[in-house]
Amino acid sequence: MLDRIRQEVAEEAKLIFKEIIANESLAPHVDPRLPIPDVFFGTGEIKLIVLGQDPTVKDAKKRREITVTLNLNKRGAVRNYLSRVCRELELDLDLNVYATNLFKNFFVKPPTQIKDFEIFEAFVPHWLPLLKEELATFPNIPIITLGQPLLRALVVDKSKGLVRKYWGYAIDWQENPPLPFSFVLPEDNKLGRRFFPFPHQPSLRKPFYKVTLPAYIDYLRTQAFT
């Protein structure tokens, strides 16, 4: 079944990308030379969905090397991060994870660096329907998202677009226990599914996320895996 899903997603993504390239306002912001990376899926029972933003890494020379979502077919910081999350959930990344991006295409540079165009507003309508089709294949599987820009692109109310709010952040977090954890409710986001927002891997350098990560993973486990 997963091979069929991968093929269907790839074919639909190519059609959407052709429409984007033909759009005069969107085309200047994408790189048509780079093929869309494949989704990543484990070889066993899928028990966790990982949702990334897009494949556009900062180093343009390395983009051509990315052939699978989040580069999860190769060793690296993101794979190590997600492997840790999976281990603490008693899952195996290579067996139990389906990973895909909201935006399947490469941009000319990372979207957060594009200041003269509302990338997220412009591209979400093109890619969101395909993503919702993908997720519908796994109706009861927990979803985690990576990164604050992606969270902001998915929530209906931008004031709910801070990852740290779901992780119980308070100014005095180092002196006191964190505030209650939470997740994004289906009615509060464009996916219509609940999901658990995680910071992207580079943000783990921040003390709050580094310290709080194990507890939020445990929260995810108790909410979605018991």
Image (spheres, rainbow, N blue to C red):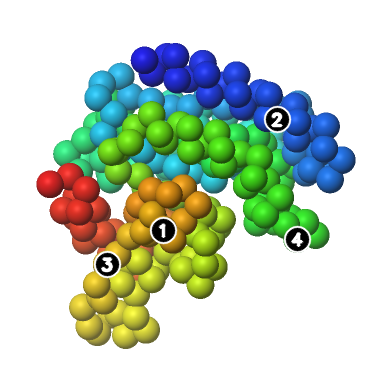
Residue 80 percent coordinates (x, y): 35, 40
Give the number of the mark in front: 4 or 3: 3
Helix, strand or loop at disc 1? helix
Label 3 to label 1: alpha-carbon separation: 18 Å
Instruction: Identify the amino acid type marked 3.
Output: Phe
Q: Residue at 30% across / 79% down in the picture?
A: 173
In the image, which disc is placed on residue 27? none
Q: Is residue 170 above or below residue 148?
A: below
- Residue 219 position by quadrant: bottom left
Q: Is residue 83 visible?
A: no
Residue designated by label 2 = 17
Q: Earlier in the sequence, mark 2 or mark 1?
A: 2
In the image, which disc is placed on residue 181? 3
Instruction: Identify the amino acid type marked 2.
Output: Phe
For residue 23, side relative to residue 85 (left or right): right
Residue 171 percent coordinates (x, y): 37, 84
Label 2 to label 1: alpha-carbon separation: 29 Å
Instruction: Identify the amino acid type marked 4.
Output: Lys
Q: Is residue 10 above or below residue 134?
A: above
Residue designated by label 1 = 187
For residue 188, side relative to residue 143 (left or right): right
Q: Residue at 26% across / 21% down in the picture?
A: 44
Q: Is residue 65 above or below residue 164?
A: above
Q: Residue at 45% across / 31% down in the picture?
A: 134
Label 3 to label 2: alpha-carbon separation: 37 Å
Instruction: Identify the amino acid type marked 1.
Output: Glu
Helix, strand or loop at disc 2? helix
Q: Earlier in the sequence, mark 2 or mark 4?
A: 2
Residue 124 percent coordinates (x, y): 62, 47
